[in-house]
Image (spheres, rainbow, N blue to C red):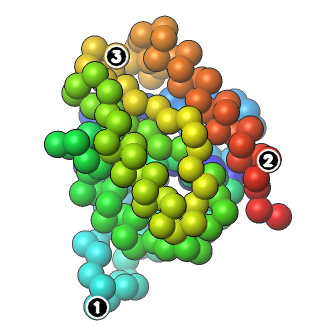
């Protein structure tokens, strides 16, 4: 099972990216092939409808990662009740070939208590390109955004919730995997 994790923050010390690294660890322990694509470290060009396929090494790598994936994790910080422009721009470069029939887990980190709006917005975009939304999602907020020295959530309930959501996502992805 190949899983693509797209970390949609443009901040170096992003808690949404830290959460992606923890999810990567959990999936690797389940013997999945995991590719974490960090859009802060590997930015893609601004989407322009008049130039849908610009020659860009990061964009080519993103598209190839998504084509190889059997399932996808999309992660974003909550910016003003929405997803990051960084993640939206990356998704705009992708299409049906990258999402059709693949299970997608939505993940968010917010300064408030919970980032529901960005999670819902991810799910709307996933539906538009025929991806399959996982009914579980992960949102960490406020003081629950702490990670220990090993990169694991410092709050036990966040760790348990993340493990539960990732296990459900993986079970669903195995069940619906395209042959």
Alpha carbons under labels 1 and 2: distance apart? 38 Å
* Residue at the right extreme, as displayed: 179
Residue 172 percent location from the top left of the image: 71, 43
Q: Along the polypeptide, which appears first: circle 2 or circle 3? A: 3
For image coordinates 41% across by 11% down, the residue present is: 154
| Residue that numbered label 3 is attached to | 144
Measuring 49% from the left and 73% from the top, which residue is drawn there?
95
Residue where numbered disc 2 is placed: 175
Question: Around disc 1, counting alpha carbons within 10 Å, would you say few (fewer than 14), some (14 to 19), or many (20 or more)?
Answer: few
- 1 vs 2, front mark: 2
The residue that appears at 40% across and 85% down in the rendered structure is: 53
Residue at the (66%, 63%) spot, across then down = 101
How far apart are the alpha carbons under marks 2 and 3? 31 Å
Name the spot of residue 8 as percent of width and height, x first. Answer: 35, 50
Vertical comparison of 178 with 160: above or below: below
Visible residue check, residue 150: no
First of labels 1, 3 by sequence position? 1
Q: Quarter-wise, where is residue 170 in the image?
A: top right
> Farthest top residue?
156
Q: Which secondary structure, mark 3?
A: helix
Label located before the other in sequence (1 or 2): 1
Q: Which residue is mark 1?
A: 50
Q: Relative to residue 61, is residue 163 depicted above or below?
A: above
121, above or below 171, in the image? below
Pinpoint residue 24: horizontal percent, then vertical percent: 56, 37
| Residue 46 screen position, x and y as percent | 25, 72
Q: Are marks 2 and 3 in contact (CB under 8 Å)?
A: no
């Amino acid at each position: 099972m190949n899983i693509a994790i797209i970390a949609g923050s443009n901040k170096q010390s992003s808690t949404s990216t830290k959460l992606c690294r923890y999810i990567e660890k959990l999936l690797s322990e389940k013997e999945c092939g995991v590719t974490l694509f960090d859009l802060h470290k590997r930015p893609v060009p601004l989407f322009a409808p008049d130039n849908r396929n610009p020659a860009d090494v990061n964009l080519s790598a993103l598209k190839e990662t998504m084509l190889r994936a059997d399932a996808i994790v999309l992660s974003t910080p909550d910016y003003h009740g929405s997803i990051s422009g960084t993640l939206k721009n990356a998704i705009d470069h992708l299409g049906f070939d990258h999402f059709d029939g693949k299970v997608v887990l939505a993940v968010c980190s917010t300064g408030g208590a919970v980032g529901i709006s960005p999670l819902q917005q991810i799910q709307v975009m996933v539906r538009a390109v025929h991806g399959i939304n996982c009914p579980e999602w992960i949102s960490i907020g406020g003081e629950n955004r702490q990670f220990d020295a090993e990169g694991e959530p410092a709050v036990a309930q966040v760790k348990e919730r993340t493990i539960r959501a990732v296990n459900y996502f993986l079970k669903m992805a195995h069940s619906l995997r395209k042959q």
